Amino acid sequence: MSEPRPSDRHDASQPDDTFEEIVGEETQRDPDLAVIEAGSRTLRTYAGSPQGEAVPARPTDPETDQALRAVEQELAGRWGETKLEPSVTRIAALMDVLGEPQRAYPSIHITGTNGKTSTARMIEALLNAFELRTGRYTSPHVQSITERISLDGSPIEPERFIETYEDIKPYVEMVDAQQPYRLSFFEVLTGMAYAAFADAPVDVAVVEVGMGGTWDATNVIDSTVAVITPISLDHTDRLGTTPAEIAGEKSGVIKQGATVILAQQPVDAAQVMLKKAVEVDATVAREGMEFGVTSREVAVGGQLLTLRGLGGEYEDIFLPLYGAHQAHNAAVALSAVEAFFGIGAEQARSLDIDAIRKAFAAVISPGRLEVVRSSPTVVLDAAHNPAGARAAADGISEAFSFSRLIGVVGTSGDKDVRGLLEAFEPIFAEVVVTQNSTDRAMDADELAAIAVEVFGDDRVQVEPRLDDALEAAITLAEEDDEYAGAGVLVTGSVITVGEARLLLGRG
């Protein structure tokens, strides 16, 4: 790996000393990981720490924890996120009785198949760097439901989450009584987010769709910037069986006169998006044309980028995330923020490079090629469809030099499991199949049957309990001296990754 170059604002007399000192402290740990962590920690001393706590633990106060659990239980009693009725009627009714809180601030709306949450986090970090107060709404959560609603880069406090729910609860019940179906889990959370952002108040909201776009509950905002991350096949039973059909649903976030930031897309999906943009007189910026990644190289703890935005080129951008897909997400995020500030259309200028560098260097994205343990190295990635799996496989192959990689895979039953396993087959020496604790999880034996067809019987081990699966994979990675450089990748579902994170002591 190459070591990232310090930016102009760094004190040249300190970086090497600091780096060596941190490596020295890590001598009892995996040498490669020590260098990775040292580089990341060194660069973050230049940039400042990431804002807030990415994955909050349970409240320490027993009463608050009990109250939060009560709210979670009430929300869980509603339609789950996978049971949908394609309409924004109910959420629109809720917004109406709440006084249209979603219109109290401008917004950036993000849809696509993969990369939405990481892109949202990058956009949020960039806006914070320019001293704007932000609200971010993303889904699903890794460990805590409060992660979904963030203010100024930090998950909403449990007390505020509870207060927000109690504040809107009477209005939710009013809408429930007037509609054929009660508001769903996701619709109520969306209402909570929009209300919390208005109450804060925020300068701008960064909103990730739950699914699709046209009839997604988030789509009651009139966003000035619509971001479309790469589209691939997922949720085909609800969104369509081709990229073009899925793009048709997702294009619903493109509003009249908005600016569309379009990541690299399949040709048929891009055509659908461009047609919609013409219909609503929206301006389109396309990755690879108006913006993109000019160069990238693997660096200690992440990658070093040169990005071409709508307002010019931005050099020496350190991003502490792995994989080419995250570099493309960074280009999309940068252009979205430029568009929000009117750069490229109304103004011909660049954003402050020091602010951009500082923001990107502080980005965190839990559960996205996240290292959570060493000796052996354990990495978590929430890939849950073939496109996400291919990106994760490429990223881990590029950033890590494992002599042998063991996979721990637990998926949901409604996904293209075979496609996901086939994407990981070239990089997994062996795979331990398991299942998470939710009803959506694919049964471990069913998953094993598919895995055997992909990997062969001798490369598949079945451990229905996730804790047993983690132990089995770590044992395989530690098997003998020949495989001293072995690692473990836990993947297949955000839920599996979140539960593994807790089991590995990161909760």
Image (spheres, rainbow, N blue to C red):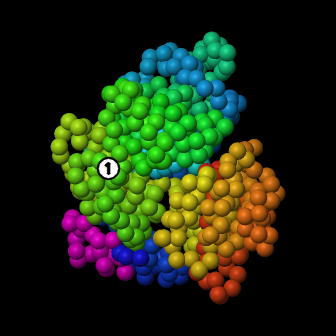
Q: Position of residue 266 (x, y in %)?
A: 48, 47
Q: Which residues are magenta?
A: 4-20
The amino acid on which the numbered mark 1 sits, given as a three-letter code, is Met
**Residue drawn at x 70%, y 81% as measured from the top left:** 479
**Image height of 184 relative to 322, above or below:** above
Q: Main secondary structure of the magenta part?
A: loop
For the point 20% across and 66% down, the residue is: 8
- Give how far across and how far down residue 259 sits, in percent: 33, 35
From the viewer's side, name the closer residue of 184 and 153: 184
The furthest residue to the left: 348
Query: Where is 411 relative to 83, above or below?
Result: below
Image quadrant where residue 88 sits: top right
Residue 315, percent across and down?
26, 61
Q: Quadrant of the C terminus?
A: bottom right
In reply to whether residue 18 is colored magenta, the answer given is: yes
Q: Which residue is mark 1?
A: 289
Q: Quadrant of residue 75?
A: top right
On the rendered structure, is 269 left or right of 123?
right
Question: Is residue 320 magenta-colored?
Answer: no
